[in-house]
Amino acid sequence: MATGGNAIRGTRVGAGPMGEQDHGFHAERIAVSYWDALGNETVRYFAAGIPDEEIPDTIDSPHSGLPAGRDQQNPPALAKAEPYKTHLAYVKERRTEEEAETLLDDALKQLRERRGLE
């Protein structure tokens, strides 16, 4: 029984001989390790010629979501999360009580005038 199979099934066109591992030029790179507060290590790769000041000092750890730094003994601490502020809280930061009273009185006066109550 003859099987009429396709010899190139499952391969890319121009892939070269089966099992060929070198598909082009690989640039030089360096591995940089980052650690989070839980001790998880994350390795990031950068081009070998990149200046050290362009390599970030901290990243977000994909394992825990915590910040991760390059110093294993002193990983960065989680920044204190600011509580959610309402619109009113932001307004109170910008206005004094006296300003708020004046604005409220003016707004009520305009509303009453529109409704014909004053």
Image (tube, rainbow, N blue to C red):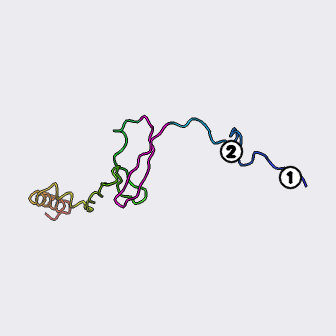
Q: Is residue 30 magenta?
A: yes
Q: Is residue 41 magenta?
A: yes
> In this picture, which residue range is highlighted in magenta?
28-49
> What residue is drawn where x is 40% and y is 60%?
64
Per the image, label 1 sits on a secondary structure element best described as: loop
Question: Circle 2 sits on which residue?
Answer: 19
Question: Circle 1 sits on which residue?
Answer: 3
Per the image, label 2 sits on a secondary structure element best described as: loop
Which circle's residue, 2 or 1, is located before the other in the chain? 1
Residue 67 picture quarter: bottom left
Question: Which sits in the foreground, 112 or 92?
Answer: 92
Decide: is 99 above or below 32: below
Question: Which sits in the foreground, 110 or 103?
Answer: 103
> What residue is drawn where x is 70% and y is 39%?
16
Which percent across, then down, holds residue 37?
A: 34, 59
- Identify the residue at the far bottom of this view: 117
Q: CA distance from mark 2 to mark 1?
A: 24 Å
Which percent across, then down, holds residue 41?
A: 41, 55
- Identify the residue at the far front of this view: 73
